[in-house]
Image (tube, grey):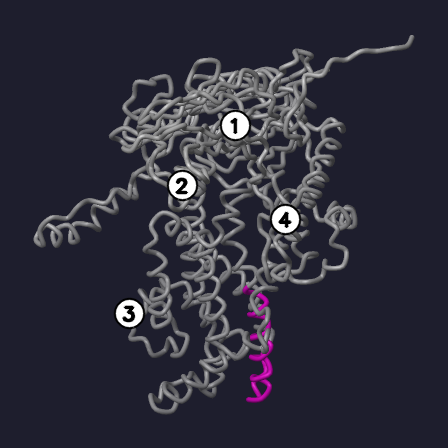
Amino acid sequence: MHESVIVGKDISKLYRIGLRKKQANRTFRETLADSLMSPIRNFRKIRQLTRFEEQVNPQDRMLPGGNGVNPGRNGILWALKNVSFEVKRGEVLGIIGRNGSGKSTLLKILSRITEPTGGDARIYGSTSSILEVGTGFHPELTGRENIFLNGVIMGMKKKRIEEKFDEIVSFAEMDKFIDTPVKRYSSGMYVRLAFSVAAHLDSDIMIVDEVLAVGDAAFQDKCLRKMDNVVQHGRTILFVSHNLGVIERLCGRAILLHEGSIIAEGKPSEVIAQYAEHPLLERCASNSLVDHPNRKEGSEIILREAKMYRNGQESGTFRPGDSMKLAVSFRRDQPISQMTFGIAIENAAGQRLSAFPSTVQAPHLAPGRVREGKIICEIPCLHLSPGTYYVTFLIRSLNSPHPSDLDRINQAIKFTVVASDYFGSDYGTVIKPGVYFEEAKWDFEGR
Amino acid sequence: MNRSASQNFIHIKRTKGWQFIRIGEINEYKDLISLMALRDLKIRYSQTILGGLWAFLQPFISMVVFTVILGKFGKIPSDGVPYPLFSFAGLVPWTYFVKAVSASSTSLVGNTSLLSKVYFPRFIIPLTPVLSGLADFAIAFSTLVCMMAYFGVYPSLSILLVPVLLLLMMLTAFGVGTLLAALNAKYRDINHVTGFLVQLWMFISPVVYPTSMVPDKYKLIFMLNPLAGIIEGFRWALLGNIPFPGQMLACSALVSSMLFFVGLSYFKQMERYFADII
């Protein structure tokens, strides 16, 4: 028996923005007149905060109100536009999308913190919302007092907190410090305690916004396992995260929000794949290198622009197995003889994962002397695991006794690899930390 | 599909028109209300040397100052009781009122994280200082009782009126506090207004001077101030030095109730916007 515990229909949310526009004051007379009139102007502006001029209708997308990119002359922003969805009992729904796509607004509406401008939602069951850890924590109170305060604020009854108190403290590994004021805690202790309270809430439905990224790696692992636990107990969870690996691990279904609307829905791996390749989502992957802040001291400005392509199209997001092409244009007044180009890939932690200079792989790339041109490097099949990576570029001339970099930019551009079902086995690719994967050949001997 | 229409659900939608307080919510959230009031108390005097003593020191020192300036130099009459006792009996409830209203009016703006991250009935936020102020009031009140013993003034059964007066004062403080809090959320001018508003209010209330000093032609307007009746009521209940201020109390009760309803209603109408404008 699967009932729907959350039913959202045409949820829309409108915000008024841009009220603090500064005006350039010209003459003194104008400035003076301006400041005298300002109380009236301010009053009108502030009053507008909760009023919207037209009968705004979410159906009307041609409204000059537009979306976040172009707020329109009226300064209104549709954070959500006709969002409809259903969550069944015991389901774990993941919500993904770019920053500003409306994820947090949707959660706020479902948590009754703000009202929808249009549409409605019905929630069958008790809800607790974890939109941040440590809500209500006060630095002057002890850990013990804060557990009760925070727990009650999030919706637990005092008796229940008393029953679960020891569990909460031991999960956070704070047994010794529980009676010290929280202002003495390290930031790690603080978030562990805050998360622990949130993790022990016992409502039917949980709405979680990005809070698993707290604490050190060991604690994050603990949190994930606790979430696995919670999921197995059949709780209904609405989960927002930027960590696509966690979404794939915990969620049975996912929806993709973009500029206030749902543009994809379905199995997490499929939705994540759509996240990566949706044309509207791709930022331009071309970067100007001329003024790059990471240029090494003493370098000439030779490298000009870098572009990245995925399967032939400009992109900054890749999936394992994609073909990646890098095109770097350069120019130098003095010609470079026996030019060689180097590329290195680093992970977000700054570890060098791979370096392949053209000297080794393509020794006659640019014979003779060159002054300007474009270097193209193509990786036919990307074997990197999901994550964020940086590319370092350098250009050298071999025609000198001690070849050194003429121009070098560390971490010049960034690209992301998102999870995808590369092997087509319905289990996705590696999600656990790991730098790359091999296309291994498998065989079984035996009976 | 077992989604029966009779099943209980929370309906989230845009609210239009007049909103009412759901009385049931008070009971549902009683744990939160008590814990928030307790939190207020614990942090009020944390890391101070004098701690709760401040609750008595503040009105006491005010009383000393007023006694010297108004009682001795100004020669303000005090309705038959020694001036120190007279003014202290006025200052004790007044101090509670001022603190409750000041804290209440800034409570929303001071709790933006709570407003934007958790749901609970918002009136709990301005309600908390009104409740936690009672602890300070209790301390100051005990001091008042000691002072009465010192001056040899013993109350009659009239002291039973004190809880009623206290309730009336809480009602007024809550009404004014919520109104200011809601206004402050949108128009931050209120932050600057509250300070001198309560100062002026003290001058138009019989805190340090008796109502008997007010000329008859102004008495009616004077009585419109709910604190006038409450404070004189306090003095009658404890010191017994004036006749029962029935008319004033009736006025106070009326105006207090109005303030309470206006404040709470405005607050409730603005509640839906708090998370967006704060």
Instruction: Classify A298 as above or below A180.
Output: above
Asked if disc 4 and disc 1 are in contact, CB closer than 8 Å, the reply is no
The residue range painted magenta reads B133-155
Query: Disc 4 is attached to a residue of which chain?
Result: A
On the same chain: label 4 and label 3? no
Q: Give the main secondary structure of the magenta stretch.
A: helix
Residue with the mark numbered 4: A191
Asked if disc 3 and disc 2 are in contact, CB closer than 8 Å, the reply is no
- Select label 3 or label 2 by which is in front: 2
Residue type at numbered disc 3: Tyr
Which comes sooner in the sequence, label 1 or label 2? Answer: 2
Residue type at numbered disc 4: Val
Q: CA distance from mark 1 to mark 2?
A: 22 Å
Which comes sooner in the sequence, label 4 or label 2? Answer: 4
- Select label 4 or label 2 by which is in front: 2
Q: CA distance from mark 1 to mark 3?
A: 77 Å
Disc sitting over residue A416 in the figure: 1
Q: Position of residue B29 (x, y in %)?
A: 62, 46
- Select label 4 or label 3 by which is in front: 4
Residue type at numbered disc 1: Thr
Query: Disc 2 is attached to a residue of which chain?
Result: A
Asked if disc 1 and disc 3 are in contact, CB closer than 8 Å, the reply is no
Which comes sooner in the sequence, label 4 or label 1? Answer: 4
Disc sitting over residue A295 in the figure: 2
Disc sitting over residue B218 in the figure: 3
On the same chain: label 1 and label 2? yes
- Helix or strand or loop: what does disc 2 sit on? loop
